[in-house]
Image (spheres, rainbow, N blue to C red):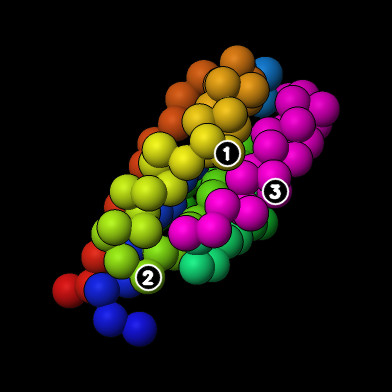
Amino acid sequence: MENVFIHHVYFWLNNPSSTTDRDKLIAGLRKLSSVKSIHQCHIGIPADTNRSVIDSTYAVSLLLTFKNDADQASYQIDPDHLAFVAECKSLWSKVIVYDSVDA
């Protein structure tokens, strides 16, 4: 697929030891995954790996692929995405996003 747009989001929780908060965030992300412009979705937690180049301090990650930049732009203003942010933003202390396109 040409012009693929990758949107990778990492979430750090306000209460990192709370499995309840982590589960609420994951549930919110699962609902979010139904947005029509998303091509593929992966929701994850840190793998049990230990190398100096790995940052596993985050609680949950979201990896979305879109067929193009326009689909990603549509996702950003989709009512389901906006509802997710409104409903879940109190759970996280930090979010980092890495967007990339084909080289």
Q: Is mark 1 on a helix, strand or loop?
A: helix
At label 1, the amino acid type is Asp
Q: What amino acid is at disc 2?
A: Lys
Magenta part of the chain = 17-37
Q: Do the residues labelled 3 and 1 touch (CB within 8 Å)?
A: no
| Magenta: main secondary structure | helix
Neighbour tally class for label 3: few under 14, some 14-19, many 20 plus, Cα within 10 Å? some
Residue 21: image location, x then y, percent: 74, 26
Residue 72 point in image, percent of width and height: 36, 54
> Which of the two labelled residues, at mark 3 and mark 2, occupies the earlier sequence position?
3
Outermost residue, right direction? 20
Residue with the mark numbered 1: 80
Front position in the image: 6 or 53: 6
Residue to which mark 3 is pinned: 30
Q: In this view, does 17 lie above or below 62?
A: above
- Residue type for callout 3: Arg
Mark 2 and mark 1 lie on one chain; the one further toward the N terminus is: 2
3 vs 2, front mark: 2
Q: Earlier in the sequence, mark 3 or mark 1?
A: 3
User: Dot 1: within a 10 Å radius of its alpha carbon, few (fewer than 14), some, or many (20 or more) residues?
Assistant: some
Can you identify the residue that label 2 sits on? Answer: 67
| Residue 29 colored in magenta in the image | yes
Q: Element at badge 2?
A: loop
Q: Quadrant of residue 84?
A: top right
